[in-house]
Amino acid sequence: MAPFGTLLHPGTLVYFLVFLLIGLAFGAILEMSGFGDSRKLAAQFYFKDLTVLKVMFTGIVVAAVLIFLSSSLGLLNYDQLWVNPTYLKSEIVGGLIMGVGFIVGGFCPGTSLVAASTLKLDGILFVLGGFFGVWAFGESVGSFADFFNSSFYGRLTVFDWLGTSPGVVVLLLTLMALVMFYLAEIAEAHFGEPKKAVSWRPQSRPKMAAVASLLSVCILLLALGQPSPQAKWERLQGGLAKNLEDREVYVHPGEVAELKKNPSLSVKIMDVRSEADFNLFHIGGAQRLDPAEMAQPATLKRLLTAPDNAVFFLVSNGEPAATQAWKALKASGVTNLYIIEGGINKWLQVFPPEPCLLASSASTPSGPADQLQFDFRYAVGAQSRAAHPDSVRTQPWVACPEGGKAATATFAELSGSTKSPIPAYVKKVKLQRKVATKGGCG
């Protein structure tokens, strides 16, 4: 499934050659379309020649339709595509500044490079002005950094904002573009030189056929919808299923405890159990993740935009529920995602809770795989020594019921050793750096 990360691996010669060829082809097409001429570009602001507007909206609509249709058909994983993060206020101001520069200079950054490559003087001066602007911005951004970084929304799309499906947004975008094409041709006829008779009724049959075809594809996209996490997993499981079969993603509780002490990592433990089991006992710092909310945009956005040093661990009482959650999130593109081996049951075997917290001294070996096998007297949450391995605390973590005595020692102190009594384990966590393929308007 695309994007083809293994084919175009960043840093390779093939990667640079492919994008070099795309850039050269893009520039050549702009020049052949007349976009290296500032007069043609500036004419759109006077409604005399709206070719730029038509080309831009054509590109936007075609890209949107193909991206989400490919996603619907399982050819593309949209969650792994780079979406520029939104800084609303600063982007509005930046857009206005660029718009004024476009009107005054007659170029946008990409078209100015096209003009400069053909040795047009205005294009060369515009490029030099752009370099000066970049330098001036870099030297002064510290004075308005608070505003520049304000109103941050991360990866925000229109359909996330509206709370609707991508198909609805693509259809509305297409209808808006068609209305703008219609009005653009009327404006060109009225303001252009020489002026033409305004025709309020579309006359071109090929254009009408193209419109009908485009709307048909949009309706098909709306009917197909976007694949669920389960459907994504079915299409991706070829390579990922082997990770499960070889248990490469099941991490021993001891390794998780060790990684939590690593200041260079941000360890996130996501507990997919019921609220009752979570309140009964959970690992220190864990956050409950409702499996029903995993496919929601807000949840995926939080996980997909995590920093490079974030490592996620899923945990349930056993392994089945956490494994299902891993499949759904992995299919949605979440990286550095692992499962705590054996779940909470194994965690409590490796890091036993205070005996006074249990109704019985031994775990119950029977029952479903995802059933908690430790009979707690009452809900302790993370207020137990077992939730914080090797943490030093001079006071008891919990008050034991019925006058029982709570231990204040760490696991290392209880074992009579300066080393943590963690059984030997095989290290499995390998931090995967995210690669964001960024792009923008030419």
Image (cartoon, grey):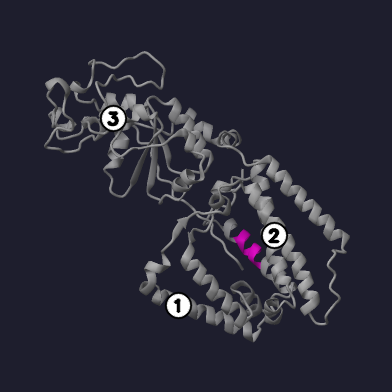
Q: Nearer the viewer, residue 132 or 170?
A: 170
Within the magenta stretch, is there residue 19?
yes
304 shown above or below 61: above
SS category of the residue bearing label 1: helix
Does residue 439 appear in the picture of this structure?
Answer: yes
**Toward which corner of the image does residue 279 lie, by quadrant?**
top left
Q: Nearer the viewer, mark 1 or mark 3?
A: 1
Horizontal side, residue 356 vs residue 38: left or right:
left
Looking at the image, tell me whether mark 1 or mark 3 is earlier in sequence order: 1
Residue at which label 1 appears = 135
Q: Nearer the viewer, residue 316 or 347?
A: 316
SS category of the residue bearing label 3: loop
Residue at which label 3 appears = 424
Residue 303 coordinates in the image, percent (x, y): 44, 45
308 shown above or below 425: below
Report the Cα–Cα distance between label 1 and label 3.
54 Å
Residue drawn at 66 percent across, 54 percent down: 64
72 shown above or below 291: below
Residue at which label 2 appears = 176
Crowding around mark 3 (Cα neighbors within 10 Å: few <14, some 14 to 19, many 20+) is: few
Which contiguous range is marked in magenta? 17-24
Report the Cα–Cα distance between label 3 and label 2.
62 Å
Give the quadrant of the C terminus: bottom right
Within the magenta stretch, is there residue 357?
no
Residue drawn at 26 percent across, 21 percent down: 376
Give the quadrant of the N terminus: top right
SS category of the residue bearing label 2: helix
Residue drawn at 41 percent across, 63 percent down: 150
What's under tag 3, amino acid-wise? Answer: Ala
Residue 399 coordinates in the image, percent (x, y): 16, 28
* Dominant SS type (magenta): helix
